[in-house]
Image: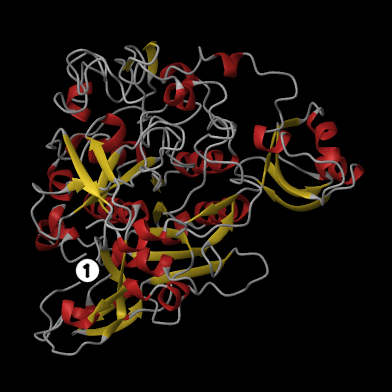
Amino acid sequence: MIRREWLALVGLATIPWFSLRAEGSKLSPDLRDNLTPGRPAVQVIIQWKQLPGWLQAEKIRQRQGVVKQNFHAVQATLAALPAEQLAGLASDLDVDYITPDRPLKGTLDYSAPTVGATLAFRSGWTGKGVAVAVIDSGVGYHPDLADVIGGQAGTSRVVYSENFVPGESSAADTYGHGTHVAGIVGGYGATSTDPNYKVSIQGMAPGVKIVNLRVLNGTGAGRDSDVIRAIERAIALKNQYNIRIINLSLGRPVFESYTLDPLCRAVETAWNAGILVVVAAGNEGRNNSAGTNGYGTIGSPANHPLALTVGAMKTMFTPQRGDDLIASYSSKGPTLIDHVVKPDIVAPGNRIISLSNGKKSYLSLNFPQTEVPVSYYKYTSSAATSDSYMWLSGTSMATPMVSGSAALMLEKESVLTPDQLKARLMKTASKSFPVSSTTTDPSTGLTYTSQYDIFTVGAGYLDVAAALSNCEVARGVAVSPSAAVVKRGVTVYIPKGTAWSTNAVWGDQTGWSLNAVWGDKVFLNGSNAVWGNNAVWGDNAVWGDSTSTGYNAVWGDNAVWGDNAVWGDNAVWGDLVSPFSALKILIYGEQ
């Protein structure tokens, strides 16, 4: 399943936790630390060393467990077992790793012109013939997701729908998140395009097909197993609908290496099947609970080195890119455990106007602040709010910007592989940023300062026009590199001979050098360390010389599990959480 040669490629082969896995570590830490005797059956994902069959099912039944489903994408079984039986099952030589069935959450008027999409439209690129699998809260019917013939909505471009939420049968969007995401990918603007409208609200690829795979329930909550099932279905339907992209505007905390995480393994399987997987970085960039100033908060499966991980920018309500700023809530790298350099790219994600599933969705009913005045896009004196559009903020909104852009690229050049798409999007991304910016939350008075470094903005700001104009083809695997500590708490650098070796995509002897992809001013100063003497911040790194708190949170062995860690005490075993737990940030966005 996992291509082990990547470990050497991204510098992970020498990390002690991988080469010296402790006895009993087949149980994930969040599972191992919560095995209270007598508690109700625990729903877990059991990864096997072979495809599960009758023998594996019998091993579960012998331990009073119930098999619920097998997954071939990750060679795993979803099952419920008594807590006291899990340690015994983990000792079986046939078992690779066991994790809980973890909860997860879902993380255009100015946005499309900002990233150059208008130029793509003028050139005739719409994403026609390409399908994007939107794995989210469902996609409701909307005229903007239909073919437009003679100004009228025709056949829906939502060509397939299926529900994976347990206990439900409909793939409709009762939450309101998935329809909004689908509109950013491929809304046509049919509801806002005639002489009465001052703004046409279009998505990135208005000709693309949408495959609707619902995994989040009516309050925006879901489970690992639901997403894995949906990814498997996308792979199975790939050839039938030409699914070339999966959009995952959702995620959860990181609990172990991506090499063991079943959600990451499913993403890797899709990638190996020829599907670009675009994932939201997360919205924890303001989280300083571990003393990291928001660093080390990238979620899963955005932490996988293959996934194209997207952070969020603010368009500042202008079509020009030059005044845009990073959204302070956008999660930052490096990733926990593996220290992968993320995000890979940033795109507009703040106060994005896209499709509404009407005023009966959970978001509309509970958060009327998401409603857009009709007068915003139509010439009218009415004070009414729109039934057709709403605005939301977060990396969930930035992710479909990139998915739609990739669809345009595939319409133009259908032979591009996921690695080539990722590499080209990163290399052509705009690399012009300020050194830093600040924003103040009016409700709390707190001010947040953002630095424009490699762990905040990745390889740069999405530029669709540049990506479509570029004809270079990368050779190799576009794994995101890993960072390594050189001097504790002071300097971090990207080791030579890893992801930028001459055998990799970013090799110095090709057109894909370190400087070409990440730039040489804001991200890295030549071959110097990210935070070296001549780099972005000088000697005092984000987690600083004076305290070890931030250092231990990102680089230490006990990063995730301490009481004061990034994810807190109730991350796994608490109630299912909404994608909008940080409502002020995600719904209102930044000013």
Residue 41 image offset from top left, x and y in percent:
81, 50
Q: Secondary structure at mark 1?
A: loop
Residue 164, relative to residue 440: is it above or below? below
The image quadrant of residue 371 is: bottom left
Q: Residue at x 56, y 43 (%)?
A: 263
Foreground residue, 291 or 500? 291
Residue 108, relative to residue 100: is it above or below? below
Amino acid type at circle 1 is Gln
Q: Is residue 488 visible?
A: yes
Position of the C terminus, as image quadrant, is bottom left
Residue 534 left/right relative to 494: left
Residue 156 image offset from top left, x and y in percent:
37, 77
Foreground residue, 261 or 551? 551
Q: Residue at x 43, y 75 (%)?
A: 140
Position of the N terminus, as image quadrant, is top right
Foreground residue, 263 or 162? 263
**Which residue is the site of mark 1?**
202
Q: Residue at x 91, y 42 (%)?
A: 62
| Residue at far top of view | 487
Residue 60 image offset from top left, x and y in percent:
84, 43
Q: How is the image coloured?
A: secondary structure
Foreground residue, 23 or 364? 364
Q: Is residue 513 visible?
A: no
Count of numbered tags = 1
